Image: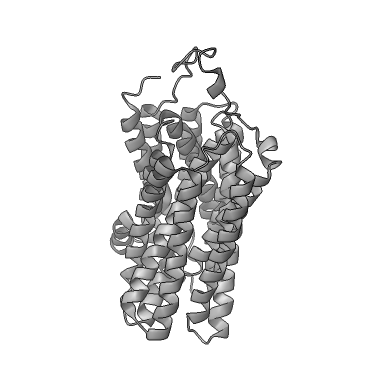
Amino acid sequence: MNNNKRWLYLAVATVILLFQGLIYAWSLFRTPFSEIYTDWTVAQLSMTFTISISCFCLGGFVGGQLSKKLGVKVRFLITAVCLFIGFFGVSMLNPADSAGSLTKLYIFYGVFGGGGVGIGYNAVISTITKWFPDKVGLASGIMLMGFGLGSLLLGSVVTGMVAAQGLFPTFKILAIAITVVMVVGAIIIKAPEAPAAPAEAKAEEKEEKSTAVSFSAGEMLKTSRFWIFFLWAIALNSAGLMVINSAANISLAFGGSAILGMVVSLFNGAGRIIAGNNFDRFGRKKSTLINVSFMMIAGILLVLAGKTNSLLLITVGLVFVGMAYGGTPTITSAYTNLSFGPKNFTANFSIANFSLLPAAIVGPMISAKLLEAAGGKYDTCFIAIIAFTLISLVLWVLLNGASKKSVNEDYK
């Protein structure tokens, strides 16, 4: 395997995911849409994001299946077509047709946008990690940092475009820009060629070390450690999503400014690199414990902030939430590769990534109920973060026991 260009591929992949991360920037578009379509309810607007997240997970699964028959360049081009249709379709909505526009928004932004990003996300992650068998965690962390920071780094640009050009022309420009980025990525990025023979050593010389097993998706789903890890990711993601999407509102409630939401996004991205580096250095056991510890520290700080009305504690607590939440997808990528082998990683990762879907429903739903019951106070939400983190800690202990029998894991 020629590694001379792998860092170039990683850089290009990070830029691709930076643009794809715009699908998570729905909050930037929600207000302009509500100003044009004044009869749309908050629930109807929120449904757009829910559909896009659902189709993102489904798109990842479809991408995993496509990888069995199509190369990475073709999958990149399929992503380009889907995203162009999605964003350009939104740009063609009719302000005079409220009901029809809402349905089309669900289809174009939610289905084509979310599904296209899912296919592209799977293609990028599964291809680039093969170039970094020695640094799977770090490579995943860098790429996912780009994905997590998409709305932050490009958000101000998009906001300025909406103000200057209008909402629908902005979507037309984004459709062209994202398509160009995907096509350039398809031209530059290549999948690594499998070595003709074991490159590092002859099989007979290292037979005792050739114990790694590659699991098919069906075989992976039959293991207890997959389901324990899957639940672990749901619990930790749910804890983060209870507050991370409301960071600006929480800051305002404690006397801060809405800019805190951007700070959380920044540490969300940083957490992805931290988790990837920890996974490469310490292995699965310690890196997952560190991530759980980050969320526990966050919960404790936020509870104390609620009792003392301290903006400083709120800020530091949300920073730890961002790092813990950002670290989970990186660990999911690295763990799936390590524990179930690189051969079927594309399909297996698409299944593991479904952990985001129930978390995206459970976390915000419980947070909304608790916030409503508490009359707008966040104290019970902060306590719930600790509760979810304790559940993830129990699952971490169970995962340790289930993983001891795995020949793939470097149990640390």
Q: Residue furthest bottom?
A: 375
Q: How is the image coloured?
A: one colour
Res. 80 visible in picture: yes
Task: Name the one closer to the observer, 3 or 116.
Answer: 3
Q: In screen coordinates, is 61 left or right of 176?
A: right
In the figure, residue 153 lies in which quadrant? bottom left
Any part of residue 97 in sight: no
- Residue at (70%, 36%) from the top-left corner? 218
The quadrant in which the N terminus is found is: top left
- Decide which of 205, 147 is in the foreground and name it: 205
Residue 386, given in percent of the width and then of the height, sits at 52, 70
- Name which quarter of the figure residue 36 lies in: bottom left
Q: Is residue 151 left or right of residue 82?
A: left
Please state which of residues 45 and 118 is positioned toward the viewer in this rendering: 118
Instruction: Examine the rendered structure and indicate whether residue 87 appears above or below residue 242.
Output: above
Residue 46 in the image: state x and y as whole percent. Answer: 53, 66
The quadrant holding residue 404 is top right
Q: Residue at x 51, y 18 (%)?
A: 206
Q: Is residue 132 above or below residue 308?
A: above
Residue 389 position in % (x across, y down): 53, 64
Task: Report how many numbered discs are placed on residues in the image.
Answer: 0
**149 and 23: which one is in front?**
149
Q: Is residue 111 above or below residue 404?
A: below
